[in-house]
Image: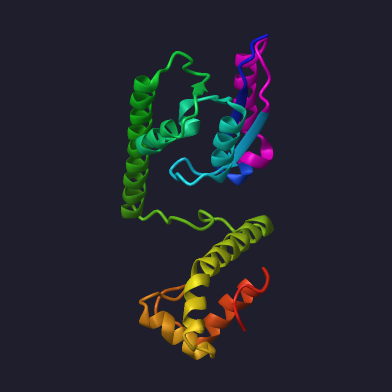
């Protein structure tokens, strides 16, 4: 039995994959098959996030744990780690050794090359998708929504949940700015709206801010606790 320690990191792109185990089970099996007879991961971290984003809190926790336990980060596939060369470079600078099950012989050079290829493929897929959507639009195909079908109750519930989530995130993005405006003497909703407009920040649906919109933002923030001054 080797004394080498491993910490596993898994990533799936959607909440649905995270809840159903789609993709996640395959990653876990690949890692366990690789380590069978050698060691078991001392910890596992699962991220539900788009591969295009670099700010991954669970990966940051996994890297911290690797440094703490002097462990190696192990992943199932290189493209699960990142499709971004700059991100791979930053990861390598974190001082943590890592292995990809699909390429155990990879060294620093080959990992850079593979990451560059994965990044290029991701960009090509994105370009082809945009081109296909543009062509469909020219043909008169209606895009978005429920694809020419009536939305079910679940469809509508998911759509509402998505809108609510975006509104809450937008409110948190505005929190610090609104705090500054209030601290500068804006004590009314109209005054806060004016301060946001002066800063060139658009309202949720574009255009200028009104008192009612500011009130909705403050209401969303209030539900999370007393963040803003009254």
The reply to whether residue 11 is in sight is: no
Question: Which residue: 46% across, 17% down?
Answer: 103
Q: How is the image coloured?
A: rainbow
> Considering depth in this image, is 134 or 111 the residue closer to the camera?
111
Magenta highlight on residue 8: no
Q: Overall secondary structure of the magenta stretch?
A: helix
- In the image, 66: left or right of 127? right
Say above or below: 137 vs 44: below
In the rendered view, would you say 22 is above or below 157?
above
Q: Is residue 28 magenta?
A: yes
Relative vertical location of residue 177 with respect to residue 22 in this rendering, above or below? below
| Viewer-nearest residue: 176 or 48 | 176
Q: Looking at the picture, how far across and down is residue 22, in whole percent? A: 63, 33
Q: Which residues are magenta?
A: 17-42
Tell whether 50 sits left or right of 153.
left
The quadrant in which residue 117 appears is top left
Look at 36% across and 82% down and name the residue there: 198
Residue 95 at what x, y percent from top left?
A: 46, 30
Q: Please state the horizontal and vertical placement of residue 139, each as a whole percent of the image.
A: 33, 52
Question: Which quadrant would residue 27 be assigned to in this image?
Answer: top right
The count of marks equals: 0
Q: Residue at x 54, y 41 (%)?
A: 60
Q: Is residue 208 above or below residue 5?
A: below
Where is residue 168 shown, x and y percent of the image? 58, 66
- Locate residue 149 relative to residue 105 in the image: left or right: right
Instruction: Give the quarter of the figure containing the C terminus.
Output: bottom right
Say if residue 80 shows up in the picture: yes
Quadrant of the image containing the N terminus: top right
């Amino acid at each position: 039995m080797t004394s080498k320690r491993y910490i596993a990191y898994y990533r799936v792109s959607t909440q649905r994959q995270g809840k159903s185990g789609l993709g996640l089970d395959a990653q876990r099996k690949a890692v366990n098959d690789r380590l069978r007879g050698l060691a078991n991961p001392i910890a596992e971290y699962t991220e539900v996030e788009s591969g295009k984003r670099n700010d991954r809190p669970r990966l940051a926790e996994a890297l911290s744990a690797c440094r703490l336990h002097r462990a190696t980060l192990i992943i199932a596939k290189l493209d699960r780690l990142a499709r971004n060369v700059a991100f791979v470079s930053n990861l390598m600078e974190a001082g943590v050794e890592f292995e990809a099950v699909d390429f155990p012989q990879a060294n620093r050079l080959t990992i850079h090359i593979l990451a560059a290829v994965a990044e290029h493929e991701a960009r090509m897929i994105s370009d082809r998708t945009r081109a296909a959507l543009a062509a469909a639009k020219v043909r008169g195909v209606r895009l978005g929504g429920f694809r020419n079908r009536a939305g079910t109750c679940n469809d509508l519930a998911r759509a509402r949940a998505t809108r609510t989530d975006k509104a809450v995130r937008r409110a948190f993005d505005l929190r610090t700015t609104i705090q500054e405006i209030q601290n500068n003497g804006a004590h009314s909703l109209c005054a806060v709206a004016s301060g946001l407009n002066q800063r060139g920040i658009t309202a949720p649906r574009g255009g200028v801010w009104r008192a009612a919109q500011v009130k909705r933002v403050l209401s969303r923030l209030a539900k999370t606790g007393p963040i803003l001054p009254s």
